[in-house]
Image (spheres, grey):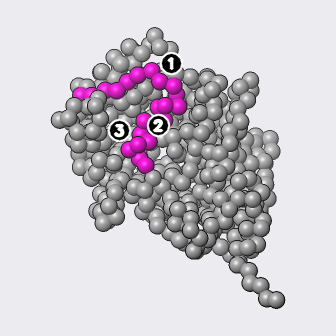
Protein backbone atom coordinates (compact mmCIF):
# COMPACT_ATOMS: atom_id res chain seq x y z
CA UNK A 1 0.00 0.00 0.00
CA UNK A 2 1.42 3.35 -1.07
CA UNK A 3 0.55 6.59 0.69
CA UNK A 4 1.45 10.13 -0.22
CA UNK A 5 2.00 12.89 2.24
CA UNK A 6 1.82 16.64 1.78
CA UNK A 7 5.12 18.44 2.53
CA UNK A 8 3.31 20.44 5.23
CA UNK A 9 2.05 17.34 7.05
CA UNK A 10 5.15 17.35 9.24
CA UNK A 11 4.39 20.91 10.34
CA UNK A 12 0.70 20.15 10.86
CA UNK A 13 1.67 17.29 13.11
CA UNK A 14 3.98 19.50 15.15
CA UNK A 15 1.55 22.31 16.02
CA UNK A 16 -1.68 22.55 17.96
CA UNK A 17 -2.88 25.46 15.85
CA UNK A 18 -3.84 25.27 12.20
CA UNK A 19 -1.74 25.34 9.05
CA UNK A 20 -3.45 26.89 6.04
CA UNK A 21 -1.93 26.17 2.62
CA UNK A 22 -2.73 27.07 -0.98
CA UNK A 23 -5.88 25.35 -2.08
CA UNK A 24 -7.39 25.30 1.41
CA UNK A 25 -10.84 26.94 1.63
CA UNK A 26 -9.63 29.53 4.13
CA UNK A 27 -6.40 30.38 2.29
CA UNK A 28 -7.44 33.76 0.89
CA UNK A 29 -8.70 34.88 4.29
CA UNK A 30 -5.60 33.58 6.05
CA UNK A 31 -3.17 35.39 3.73
CA UNK A 32 -4.98 38.76 3.88
CA UNK A 33 -3.27 41.58 5.78
CA UNK A 34 -4.39 45.01 6.99
CA UNK A 35 -2.76 46.94 4.13
CA UNK A 36 -4.34 45.79 0.85
CA UNK A 37 -1.32 47.11 -1.05
CA UNK A 38 0.44 43.85 -0.14
CA UNK A 39 -1.42 41.04 -1.93
CA UNK A 40 1.00 38.19 -1.40
CA UNK A 41 0.70 34.42 -1.62
CA UNK A 42 2.64 32.59 1.09
CA UNK A 43 3.24 28.87 0.89
CA UNK A 44 1.42 28.49 4.20
CA UNK A 45 0.11 30.41 7.20
CA UNK A 46 0.55 28.93 10.67
CA UNK A 47 -2.07 30.11 13.17
CA UNK A 48 -0.03 29.51 16.31
CA UNK A 49 -1.74 29.04 19.65
CA UNK A 50 1.33 28.92 21.89
CA UNK A 51 5.10 29.31 21.96
CA UNK A 52 5.49 25.63 21.06
CA UNK A 53 3.74 26.26 17.75
CA UNK A 54 6.02 29.20 17.05
CA UNK A 55 9.11 27.09 17.78
CA UNK A 56 7.88 24.37 15.41
CA UNK A 57 7.17 26.90 12.67
CA UNK A 58 10.58 28.55 12.92
CA UNK A 59 12.34 25.19 12.80
CA UNK A 60 10.26 24.10 9.80
CA UNK A 61 10.97 27.31 7.91
CA UNK A 62 14.69 26.93 8.47
CA UNK A 63 14.71 23.25 7.54
CA UNK A 64 12.92 23.98 4.27
CA UNK A 65 14.70 27.30 3.53
CA UNK A 66 11.42 29.22 3.51
CA UNK A 67 11.29 33.00 3.97
CA UNK A 68 9.65 33.72 7.33
CA UNK A 69 7.14 36.48 8.04
CA UNK A 70 5.67 37.29 11.45
CA UNK A 71 2.17 38.69 11.90
CA UNK A 72 0.81 40.07 15.14
CA UNK A 73 -1.89 42.69 14.79
CA UNK A 74 -1.30 42.71 11.00
CA UNK A 75 -0.95 46.51 10.91
CA UNK A 76 2.49 46.60 9.30
CA UNK A 77 1.97 49.26 6.65
CA UNK A 78 5.14 48.01 4.94
CA UNK A 79 3.58 44.56 4.60
CA UNK A 80 6.15 42.70 6.69
CA UNK A 81 3.45 40.37 8.02
CA UNK A 82 3.27 38.42 4.79
CA UNK A 83 5.59 37.01 2.12
CA UNK A 84 5.35 35.32 -1.27
CA UNK A 85 6.20 31.59 -1.23
CA UNK A 86 7.26 31.64 2.42
CA UNK A 87 5.85 30.79 5.82
CA UNK A 88 3.75 33.24 7.80
CA UNK A 89 3.61 32.80 11.57
CA UNK A 90 0.31 34.38 12.59
CA UNK A 91 0.00 35.13 16.33
CA UNK A 92 -3.59 36.41 16.23
CA UNK A 93 -4.88 33.47 18.30
CA UNK A 94 -2.40 34.26 21.07
CA UNK A 95 -4.18 37.20 22.71
CA UNK A 96 -4.36 36.45 26.41
CA UNK A 97 -3.53 39.19 28.94
CA UNK A 98 -2.82 38.56 32.64
CA UNK A 99 -2.76 41.55 35.00
CA UNK A 100 -1.04 41.73 38.39
CA UNK A 101 -2.72 44.77 39.96
CA UNK A 102 -0.56 44.74 43.07
CA UNK A 103 2.70 44.78 41.13
CA UNK A 104 1.13 47.03 38.46
CA UNK A 105 2.31 44.81 35.65
CA UNK A 106 0.66 42.86 32.86
CA UNK A 107 1.90 40.05 30.65
CA UNK A 108 0.28 39.68 27.25
CA UNK A 109 0.68 37.15 24.46
CA UNK A 110 2.34 38.34 21.27
CA UNK A 111 -0.83 38.45 19.17
CA UNK A 112 -2.77 40.72 21.53
CA UNK A 113 -4.01 44.06 20.23
CA UNK A 114 -4.10 47.26 22.23
CA UNK A 115 -7.85 46.77 22.43
CA UNK A 116 -7.28 43.44 24.18
CA UNK A 117 -4.63 44.90 26.45
CA UNK A 118 -6.54 48.05 27.41
CA UNK A 119 -9.70 46.07 28.16
CA UNK A 120 -7.82 43.79 30.56
CA UNK A 121 -5.86 46.50 32.39
CA UNK A 122 -8.73 48.99 32.60
CA UNK A 123 -10.61 46.64 34.92
CA UNK A 124 -7.98 47.61 37.51
CA UNK A 125 -7.75 51.31 36.60
CA UNK A 126 -4.35 50.76 34.99
CA UNK A 127 -2.82 51.36 31.55
CA UNK A 128 0.41 51.86 29.67
CA UNK A 129 1.36 53.73 26.49
CA UNK A 130 -0.06 51.98 23.45
CA UNK A 131 -0.91 53.49 20.10
CA UNK A 132 -3.97 55.39 18.91
CA UNK A 133 -5.94 52.62 17.13
CA UNK A 134 -7.23 49.68 19.17
CA UNK A 135 -6.70 47.07 16.45
CA UNK A 136 -2.94 47.67 16.36
CA UNK A 137 -0.86 44.77 17.70
CA UNK A 138 1.08 45.34 20.90
CA UNK A 139 4.15 43.49 19.62
CA UNK A 140 4.97 45.44 16.48
CA UNK A 141 4.21 48.79 18.06
CA UNK A 142 6.34 48.13 21.15
CA UNK A 143 9.30 46.64 19.30
CA UNK A 144 9.53 49.76 17.14
CA UNK A 145 9.29 52.10 20.14
CA UNK A 146 5.61 52.77 20.63
CA UNK A 147 4.01 56.23 20.72
CA UNK A 148 0.52 57.00 21.91
CA UNK A 149 -1.74 59.03 24.15
CA UNK A 150 0.30 58.44 27.31
CA UNK A 151 3.79 59.00 25.86
CA UNK A 152 4.45 62.36 27.52
CA UNK A 153 3.34 61.06 30.93
CA UNK A 154 4.51 57.43 30.88
CA UNK A 155 7.16 57.21 28.16
CA UNK A 156 7.14 55.07 25.05
CA UNK A 157 5.66 51.57 25.00
CA UNK A 158 9.18 50.13 24.89
CA UNK A 159 10.10 52.17 27.98
CA UNK A 160 7.40 50.29 29.86
CA UNK A 161 8.45 46.85 28.65
CA UNK A 162 9.89 44.91 31.60
CA UNK A 163 10.31 41.47 30.05
CA UNK A 164 9.65 39.32 27.00
CA UNK A 165 9.70 35.73 25.75
CA UNK A 166 11.35 35.38 22.35
CA UNK A 167 11.66 32.46 19.92
CA UNK A 168 15.05 32.91 18.30
CA UNK A 169 16.24 31.90 14.85
CA UNK A 170 17.46 28.58 16.33
CA UNK A 171 13.92 27.77 17.39
CA UNK A 172 14.82 28.31 21.04
CA UNK A 173 12.68 30.17 23.60
CA UNK A 174 14.60 32.87 25.48
CA UNK A 175 13.11 34.83 28.38
CA UNK A 176 14.74 38.21 28.72
CA UNK A 177 14.58 41.23 30.99
CA UNK A 178 17.04 43.58 32.67
CA UNK A 179 18.80 40.61 34.34
CA UNK A 180 18.35 37.71 31.89
CA UNK A 181 19.77 38.10 28.38
CA UNK A 182 19.93 41.88 28.88
CA UNK A 183 21.47 42.44 25.44
CA UNK A 184 18.41 40.96 23.76
CA UNK A 185 16.07 42.87 26.07
CA UNK A 186 17.87 46.11 25.20
CA UNK A 187 17.56 45.44 21.46
CA UNK A 188 13.84 44.61 21.61
CA UNK A 189 13.08 48.07 22.97
CA UNK A 190 13.07 49.87 19.65
CA UNK A 191 15.02 47.46 17.43
CA UNK A 192 11.96 46.06 15.67
CA UNK A 193 11.40 42.42 14.71
CA UNK A 194 15.03 41.71 13.88
CA UNK A 195 15.84 39.36 16.75
CA UNK A 196 13.09 36.78 16.95
CA UNK A 197 9.37 36.21 17.40
CA UNK A 198 8.13 37.71 20.64
CA UNK A 199 5.51 35.38 22.08
CA UNK A 200 4.79 37.37 25.24
CA UNK A 201 5.50 40.85 26.56
CA UNK A 202 5.41 42.11 30.14
CA UNK A 203 4.67 45.78 30.84
CA UNK A 204 4.79 48.26 33.68
CA UNK A 205 1.36 49.81 34.29
CA UNK A 206 0.28 53.23 35.51
CA UNK A 207 -2.87 54.48 37.26
CA UNK A 208 -5.01 55.69 34.35
CA UNK A 209 -8.77 55.24 34.43
CA UNK A 210 -11.01 57.91 32.90
CA UNK A 211 -9.52 60.56 30.60
CA UNK A 212 -10.74 63.79 29.00
CA UNK A 213 -10.32 63.34 25.29
CA UNK A 214 -11.48 63.81 21.76
CA UNK A 215 -11.02 66.00 18.68
CA UNK A 216 -10.97 69.78 18.26
CA UNK A 217 -10.96 71.10 14.68
CA UNK A 218 -9.54 74.31 13.22
CA UNK A 219 -8.96 75.72 9.71
CA UNK A 220 -5.75 74.55 8.06
CA UNK A 221 -3.42 77.37 9.09
CA UNK A 222 0.26 77.57 9.98
CA UNK A 223 -0.61 79.70 12.99
CA UNK A 224 -2.52 76.76 14.47
CA UNK A 225 0.60 74.61 14.10
CA UNK A 226 2.78 77.28 15.70
CA UNK A 227 0.37 77.62 18.62
CA UNK A 228 0.23 73.83 19.03
CA UNK A 229 4.03 73.70 19.26
CA UNK A 230 3.90 76.33 22.02
CA UNK A 231 1.16 74.39 23.80
CA UNK A 232 3.25 71.21 23.86
CA UNK A 233 6.27 73.08 25.25
CA UNK A 234 4.22 74.45 28.14
CA UNK A 235 1.65 71.70 28.82
CA UNK A 236 1.78 69.30 31.79
CA UNK A 237 2.80 65.77 30.83
CA UNK A 238 -0.73 64.53 31.57
CA UNK A 239 -1.89 66.48 28.51
CA UNK A 240 -1.10 64.77 25.21
CA UNK A 241 -2.21 66.44 22.00
CA UNK A 242 -1.48 64.82 18.62
CA UNK A 243 -1.65 67.29 15.73
CA UNK A 244 -3.60 65.99 12.74
CA UNK A 245 -3.84 67.39 9.22
CA UNK A 246 -6.86 65.81 7.54
CA UNK A 247 -9.87 66.48 5.39
CA UNK A 248 -12.82 67.39 7.59
CA UNK A 249 -14.68 64.21 8.57
CA UNK A 250 -18.38 63.81 7.94
CA UNK A 251 -19.21 63.77 11.64
CA UNK A 252 -22.01 65.52 13.55
CA UNK A 253 -19.58 67.60 15.61
CA UNK A 254 -18.17 69.28 12.47
CA UNK A 255 -20.43 71.62 10.44
CA UNK A 256 -21.20 70.36 6.95
CA UNK A 257 -19.40 73.25 5.25
CA UNK A 258 -16.13 71.85 6.67
CA UNK A 259 -16.71 68.29 5.46
CA UNK A 260 -13.98 67.32 3.02
CA UNK A 261 -12.04 70.58 3.50
CA UNK A 262 -8.44 70.62 4.78
CA UNK A 263 -8.30 71.21 8.52
CA UNK A 264 -6.00 70.97 11.52
CA UNK A 265 -7.23 68.83 14.39
CA UNK A 266 -6.02 68.41 17.96
CA UNK A 267 -6.42 64.77 19.03
CA UNK A 268 -6.38 65.21 22.79
CA UNK A 269 -6.00 62.89 25.76
CA UNK A 270 -5.79 64.45 29.21
CA UNK A 271 -5.16 61.94 31.99
CA UNK A 272 -5.20 64.48 34.82
CA UNK A 273 -7.97 65.42 37.28
CA UNK A 274 -11.45 66.39 36.09
CA UNK A 275 -11.10 69.74 37.84
CA UNK A 276 -8.58 70.77 35.16
CA UNK A 277 -10.77 69.95 32.15
CA UNK A 278 -11.83 73.56 31.61
CA UNK A 279 -8.18 74.63 31.55
CA UNK A 280 -7.54 71.99 28.90
CA UNK A 281 -10.37 73.41 26.80
CA UNK A 282 -8.96 76.90 27.24
CA UNK A 283 -5.57 75.71 25.98
CA UNK A 284 -7.22 74.13 22.96
CA UNK A 285 -9.28 77.26 22.30
CA UNK A 286 -6.01 79.18 22.18
CA UNK A 287 -4.78 77.26 19.14
CA UNK A 288 -7.10 79.09 16.74
CA UNK A 289 -10.75 79.47 15.71
CA UNK A 290 -12.56 76.26 16.68
CA UNK A 291 -14.81 75.03 13.85
CA UNK A 292 -15.88 71.75 15.45
CA UNK A 293 -15.30 69.74 18.59
CA UNK A 294 -16.02 66.45 20.25
CA UNK A 295 -14.53 66.30 23.77
CA UNK A 296 -15.78 64.29 26.73
CA UNK A 297 -14.75 62.25 29.74
CA UNK A 298 -14.35 58.61 28.69
CA UNK A 299 -12.72 55.38 29.88
CA UNK A 300 -9.13 55.30 28.64
CA UNK A 301 -9.73 52.28 26.31
CA UNK A 302 -12.37 54.26 24.41
CA UNK A 303 -9.98 56.93 23.18
CA UNK A 304 -8.00 54.24 21.35
CA UNK A 305 -11.11 53.31 19.35
CA UNK A 306 -12.10 56.75 18.01
CA UNK A 307 -10.48 56.16 14.60
CA UNK A 308 -11.13 52.42 14.29
CA UNK A 309 -14.11 52.84 11.94
CA UNK A 310 -12.19 55.21 9.66
CA UNK A 311 -9.27 52.77 9.36
CA UNK A 312 -10.70 49.27 8.79
CA UNK A 313 -8.68 46.45 7.24
CA UNK A 314 -8.55 46.35 3.47
CA UNK A 315 -7.55 49.93 2.62
CA UNK A 316 -4.39 50.80 0.70
CA UNK A 317 -1.66 52.62 2.67
CA UNK A 318 1.72 54.14 1.95
CA UNK A 319 3.52 56.04 4.75
CA UNK A 320 6.66 57.95 5.57
CA UNK A 321 8.03 59.32 8.84
CA UNK A 322 10.62 61.68 10.30
CA UNK A 323 11.75 63.01 13.67
CA UNK A 324 12.40 66.64 14.53
CA UNK A 325 13.43 68.76 17.51
CA UNK A 326 11.10 71.56 16.43
CA UNK A 327 8.61 72.52 13.77
CA UNK A 328 10.61 75.04 11.78
CA UNK A 329 9.03 77.46 9.34
CA UNK A 330 10.18 75.19 6.52
CA UNK A 331 8.50 72.18 8.11
CA UNK A 332 5.30 74.13 8.71
CA UNK A 333 5.30 75.30 5.09
CA UNK A 334 5.67 71.69 3.86
CA UNK A 335 2.85 70.52 6.11
CA UNK A 336 0.59 73.35 4.93
CA UNK A 337 1.30 72.62 1.25
CA UNK A 338 0.61 68.90 1.47
CA UNK A 339 -2.03 69.18 4.17
CA UNK A 340 -3.90 71.33 1.68
CA UNK A 341 -3.70 68.67 -1.02
CA UNK A 342 -4.68 65.55 0.94
CA UNK A 343 -5.63 63.06 -1.80
CA UNK A 344 -8.41 61.19 0.04
CA UNK A 345 -10.64 61.43 3.10
CA UNK A 346 -8.73 58.55 4.70
CA UNK A 347 -5.26 60.14 4.29
CA UNK A 348 -3.70 62.05 7.14
CA UNK A 349 -0.66 63.59 8.74
CA UNK A 350 -0.09 63.00 12.46
CA UNK A 351 2.59 64.80 14.46
CA UNK A 352 3.16 63.05 17.81
CA UNK A 353 4.79 64.85 20.72
CA UNK A 354 7.55 62.69 22.21
CA UNK A 355 8.92 64.88 24.97
CA UNK A 356 8.20 64.65 28.69
CA UNK A 357 8.82 61.14 30.02
CA UNK A 358 10.23 60.07 26.64
CA UNK A 359 13.24 62.29 27.37
CA UNK A 360 13.96 60.75 30.75
CA UNK A 361 15.95 57.90 29.21
CA UNK A 362 19.40 58.29 27.69
CA UNK A 363 19.76 57.70 23.91
CA UNK A 364 21.77 54.50 24.53
CA UNK A 365 19.50 53.15 27.27
CA UNK A 366 17.19 51.47 24.75
CA UNK A 367 17.49 50.80 21.03
CA UNK A 368 15.14 53.73 20.35
CA UNK A 369 17.80 56.30 19.53
CA UNK A 370 16.11 59.67 19.04
CA UNK A 371 15.66 60.77 22.64
CA UNK A 372 16.40 64.36 21.62
CA UNK A 373 13.47 64.43 19.18
CA UNK A 374 10.40 66.36 20.32
CA UNK A 375 8.10 65.43 17.45
CA UNK A 376 7.51 62.37 15.27
CA UNK A 377 5.93 63.08 11.89
CA UNK A 378 3.76 60.39 10.28
CA UNK A 379 2.24 61.16 6.91
CA UNK A 380 0.95 59.29 3.94
CA UNK A 381 -1.89 58.45 1.64
CA UNK A 382 -4.66 55.96 2.30
CA UNK A 383 -7.03 55.02 -0.51
CA UNK A 384 -9.64 52.49 -1.62
CA UNK A 385 -9.06 51.92 -5.35
CA UNK A 386 -5.90 50.05 -6.42
CA UNK A 387 -5.92 52.05 -9.66
CA UNK A 388 -5.00 55.10 -7.58
CA UNK A 389 -1.88 53.53 -6.06
CA UNK A 390 0.73 55.19 -8.27
CA UNK A 391 -0.72 58.67 -7.76
CA UNK A 392 -1.00 58.33 -3.98
CA UNK A 393 2.48 56.87 -3.56
CA UNK A 394 3.92 59.72 -5.66
CA UNK A 395 2.11 62.30 -3.48
CA UNK A 396 3.56 60.78 -0.31
CA UNK A 397 7.08 60.68 -1.72
CA UNK A 398 6.84 64.32 -2.79
CA UNK A 399 5.64 65.24 0.71
CA UNK A 400 8.60 63.38 2.19
CA UNK A 401 11.04 65.17 -0.13
CA UNK A 402 9.62 68.55 0.87
CA UNK A 403 9.74 67.82 4.61
CA UNK A 404 13.05 65.96 4.84
CA UNK A 405 15.34 69.07 4.77
CA UNK A 406 13.51 70.42 7.82
CA UNK A 407 13.68 67.31 10.02
CA UNK A 408 16.33 65.08 11.55
CA UNK A 409 18.12 62.49 9.48
CA UNK A 410 16.26 59.47 10.85
CA UNK A 411 12.67 58.55 11.55
CA UNK A 412 10.46 56.12 13.43
CA UNK A 413 10.82 52.60 12.04
CA UNK A 414 7.11 51.80 12.39
CA UNK A 415 6.31 54.62 9.95
CA UNK A 416 8.81 53.42 7.32
CA UNK A 417 7.85 51.57 4.15
CA UNK A 418 9.64 48.83 2.22
CA UNK A 419 11.66 51.34 0.19
CA UNK A 420 13.24 52.87 3.31
CA UNK A 421 15.87 50.20 3.93
CA UNK A 422 18.58 52.73 3.11
CA UNK A 423 17.54 54.69 6.22
CA UNK A 424 17.95 51.87 8.73
CA UNK A 425 21.38 52.98 9.94
CA UNK A 426 20.33 56.60 10.49
CA UNK A 427 17.06 55.49 12.10
CA UNK A 428 19.14 53.76 14.79
CA UNK A 429 21.90 56.31 14.85
CA UNK A 430 24.51 55.69 17.58
CA UNK A 431 22.83 52.38 18.51
CA UNK A 432 23.18 50.74 15.10
CA UNK A 433 26.52 48.99 15.62
CA UNK A 434 25.40 47.59 18.97
CA UNK A 435 22.18 46.35 17.37
CA UNK A 436 24.20 44.60 14.67
CA UNK A 437 26.22 42.82 17.35
CA UNK A 438 23.01 41.57 19.00
CA UNK A 439 21.69 40.53 15.59
CA UNK A 440 24.84 38.52 14.90
CA UNK A 441 24.45 36.73 18.21
CA UNK A 442 20.78 35.81 17.95
CA UNK A 443 20.18 35.70 14.17
CA UNK A 444 23.50 35.43 12.31
CA UNK A 445 21.82 34.08 9.14
CA UNK A 446 19.22 36.88 9.06
CA UNK A 447 16.24 34.54 9.27
CA UNK A 448 14.18 37.48 10.55
CA UNK A 449 14.78 39.86 7.66
CA UNK A 450 11.25 40.93 6.76
CA UNK A 451 11.41 44.14 8.76
CA UNK A 452 13.39 47.38 8.76
CA UNK A 453 16.32 45.08 8.58
CA UNK A 454 19.53 45.25 10.58
CA UNK A 455 21.77 42.96 8.57
CA UNK A 456 24.19 40.89 10.68
The residue wearing badge 1 is 272
Q: CA distance from mark 3 to mark 2?
A: 16 Å
The residue wearing badge 2 is 305
Q: Residue at x 73, y 41 (%)?
A: 163
Q: Position of residue 244 (x, y in %)?
A: 35, 38
Residue 296 on the magenta span: yes
Instruction: Tell me if mark 2 has few (under 14), some (14-19) or many (20+) residues whose alpha carbon lies within 10 angstroms of its own.
Output: some
Going by the image, does 199 lie left or right of 425? Answer: right
Disc 2 is placed on an element classified as loop
User: Depth check: 292 or 236 in front?
Assistant: 292
- Displayed quadrant of residue 52: bottom right
Can see residue 373?
Answer: no
Residue 244 numbered tag: 3
CB-based contact (under 8 Å), mark 3 and mark 1: no
Residue at the outermost front position: 1
User: Depth check: 165 or 223 in front?
Assistant: 165
- Residue segment shown in magenta: 291-312
Instruction: Tell me if mark 1 has few (under 14), some (14-19) or many (20+) residues whose alpha carbon lies within 10 angstroms of its own.
Output: some
Q: Position of residue 117 (x, y in %)?
A: 61, 37
Q: Earlier in the sequence, mark 3 or mark 2?
A: 3
Residue 192 on the magenta span: no
From what the image shows, is residue 178 above or below residue 14? above
- Where is the C terminus found, in terms of image quarters? bottom right
Q: Earlier in the sequence, mark 2 or mark 1?
A: 1
Going by the image, does 108 lie left or right of 286? Answer: right
- Displayed quadrant of residue 385: bottom left
Amino acid sequence: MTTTTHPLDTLRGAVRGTVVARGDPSYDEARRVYNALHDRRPAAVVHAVDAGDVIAAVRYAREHALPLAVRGGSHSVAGFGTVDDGLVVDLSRMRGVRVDPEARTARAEGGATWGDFNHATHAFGLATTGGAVSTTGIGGLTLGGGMGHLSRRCGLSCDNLVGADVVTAEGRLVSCDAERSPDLFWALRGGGGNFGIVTSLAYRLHPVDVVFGGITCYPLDGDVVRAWQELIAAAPVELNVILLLVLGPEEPFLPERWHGRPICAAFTCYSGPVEEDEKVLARLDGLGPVVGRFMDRMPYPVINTLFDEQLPPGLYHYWKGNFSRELSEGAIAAHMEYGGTMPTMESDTAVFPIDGACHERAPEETAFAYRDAVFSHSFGATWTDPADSERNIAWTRAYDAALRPHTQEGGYVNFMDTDDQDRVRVNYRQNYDRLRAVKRRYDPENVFRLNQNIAP
